[in-house]
Image (cartoon, rainbow, N blue to C red):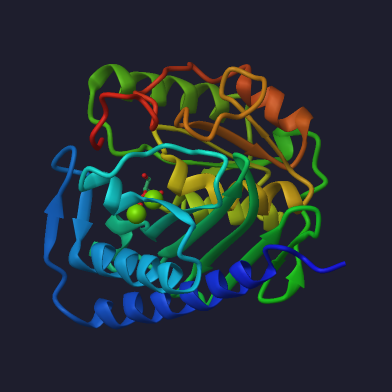
Amino acid sequence: MTDLWQNSMDHAVAAARRAGQVVQQALQDDRKVMTKSSSVDLVTQTDQRVEQLIIQSVKEKFPTHRFIGEESVAAGEPCVLTDDPTWIIDPIDGTTNFVHAFPFVAVSIGFSVNKQVEFGVVYSCLEDKMFTARRGRGAFCNGEPLQVSHQTDIKQSIIATEFGSSRDPEAVDKIFSSLRNVLCIPIHGVRGAGTAAVNMCLVASGCVEAYYETGIHVWDVAAGSLIVSEAGGVLMDTEGGEVDLMSRRIVAANNRTIAERIIREIDPFSPTRDDAPSKSSQ
Ligand SMILES: O=P(O)(O)OC(CO)CO
Ligand SMILES: [Mg+2]
Ligand SMILES: [Mg+2]
């Protein structure tokens, strides 16, 4: 059976690879750093340039498709997911890593139709790892199938998470209390690559049992969410139940047992939603 979205997915893979080359090249140059919602929410000209490169190339080939791009939203474009085919783009996931040459930086492209992610592409460009997933057809890294860990004992697990870019003391307290609770279950360890997309690919690859975070955005996790579920994993909200990609809260785990065990330890909070009407950029 022909796959309606295969052309779009092929385009996404090629665009992510080209974008990754631009990012790698830019690592050799001076990186002029600007800030967005706060002094620790960083952006560079490379983020903006890469996003425009991807969007322009998609517009030429698929003129009716819509976009949610991190830097376009920061510039005032709406962040609304409709039923139309929509490219959800994070040109550099791990901008802080990029600025410091910390070696985990990804280009993330999710594609949704009827508000369902149809394919996801995460190119971890310094590792040269191309993660892909097509709904119902599995997840892959450089063409090799991915499978989540089979572990069901949280005490034998490694969990990935991040501290995020909020420095609001109340949010930071929640992040630390959750981290303390999870660590003291006890688990084997906590890791964080500095990019949500790569953290989710680590879950899909079976290297960590789960990743959770509050404060991420739809463009951080749209592609990774499908890569996790197509590798056999599960996605949940930090208070349990179904994940909502606009809610800025996510638990991505190898299975439900691990996800629910982590959720018991999370001190939940709710940042402003990505699709909140009055929101410009955060
Ligand atoms: O580097 P970015 O794209 O701002 O993303 C961060 C989270 O918002 C790392 O995942
Ligand atoms: Mg990001
Ligand atoms: Mg980004």
Q: Quadrant of the N terminus?
A: bottom right
- Where residue 221 appears, as percent x and y from the top left, is 51, 46
- Where residue 204 appears, as percent x and y from the top left, is 68, 54
Q: Nearer the viewer, residue 14 or 248?
A: 14
Q: Residue furthest right?
A: 1
Tell me if I can see residue 191 in this picture. no
Q: Nearer the viewer, residue 58 or 227?
A: 58
Q: Quadrant of residue 182?
A: top right
> In the figure, 255 relative to 101: above or below?
above
**Number of numbered discs overlaid on the protein picture:** 0
Residue sitting at x 41%, y 74%: 57
Q: On the picture, is 125 further left or further right than 134?
A: left
Q: Nearer the viewer, residue 47 or 30?
A: 47
Residue sitting at x 28%, y 53%: 71
Q: On the picture, is 2 further left or further right than 121?
A: right
Q: Quadrant of residue 254?
A: top right
> In the figure, 148 relative to 189: above or below?
below
Q: Quadrant of the C terminus?
A: top left
Residue sitting at x 44%, y 75%: 126
Q: Residue furthest front?
A: 64
- Where residue 116 appears, as percent x and y from the top left, is 64, 42
